[in-house]
Amino acid sequence: MKPVLIFLAALLLAATVQADTGTGTSVPTFSALKPGQALPPALRFVAIPRIKRNSVALVADQGITVLKVDSNNSAGSISLPFNIDPTKMPMLSWRWKVSRVIDKADMEDKAGDDFAARVYVFFDVPLESLSFTERNKIRLARLVAGPDVPTAALVYVWDNKHRIGYAHASPFTKSVQKFVLQSGPEHVGAWMSETRDVAADFRLAFGREPPRVTGVAIGNDTDQTGEQVTTWFGDFHFAPK
């Protein structure tokens, strides 16, 4: 049951934000919010059906408000309402920090598909260009959430053992392609800054020009391995190259 649930949940993450967003690149930044306050409506928590929910909160870290995500045999993500043309605004920047890596994780295996931190970027690939199997998965998701469910995603992850720069398709679907940005315990407990050219990464992963970005989602998950991790995220920004 879980492979279908995870795939649907991943696709639904971006669909939840599209009704409320136009074509802008601005989202509420964590640093502009107050520690302890409720997340604004634009920043939505998206759970996976039948799986324990992560705990999320705005907290102060070195005097700056950031998002804290606790995962304990659980999963879930916060959706960020980006809706942009990645050929014009391809550079996605953020910073993140983790309390530990997931010891038993394995990004190539369904049974170990957990991450200390992950960032989804969703794209609206033409449905007719996908394989028969992938088209049917998307159609199933759209029956649940409506026609705005995206058709492809990049996932930037903090892994436990694969080298930085390693890329691999999700064990659940080829429509989700993963990139390892941090790996192992060397930088555990330290803020790490990231900047990615999502247009270039999309071309590398899917061999085509990138369509519109329809959303970003951030979080962690430990429901496969039953482990525990705390992750902190700073602000996210898109910018021209």
Image (tube, rainbow, N blue to C red):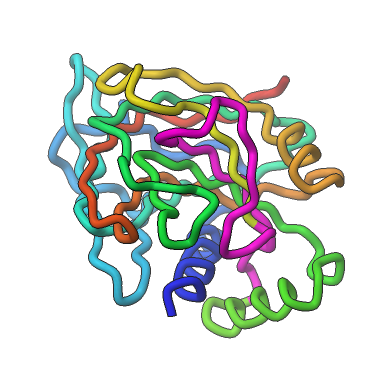
Q: Which residue sits at x=23%, y=41%?
A: 229
The secondary structure that dominates the magenta segment is loop
On the image, the x and y values in percent for residue 176 come to 63, 55
In this picture, is 75 found above or below 239? Answer: below
Q: Which residue sits at x=17%, y=25%?
A: 60
Question: Can residue 165 be found in the magenta stretch?
Answer: yes
Q: Which residues are magenta?
A: 147-175
On the image, the x and y values in percent for residue 189 come to 25, 21
Camera-side residue of 119 and 34: 119
On the image, the x and y values in percent for residue 72 come to 19, 53
Q: Quadrant of residue 63?
A: top left
Q: Position of 238 compared to 57: left or right?
A: right
- Looking at the rendered image, the quarter that the C terminus falls into is top right
In this picture, is 208 found above or below 1? Answer: above
Question: Can the viewer see residue 70 in this picture?
Answer: yes
Q: Quadrant of residue 148?
A: bottom right
Q: Position of 77 compared to 34: left or right?
A: right
On the image, the x and y values in percent for residue 127 come to 79, 69
Q: Which residue sits at x=69%, y=63%?
A: 151
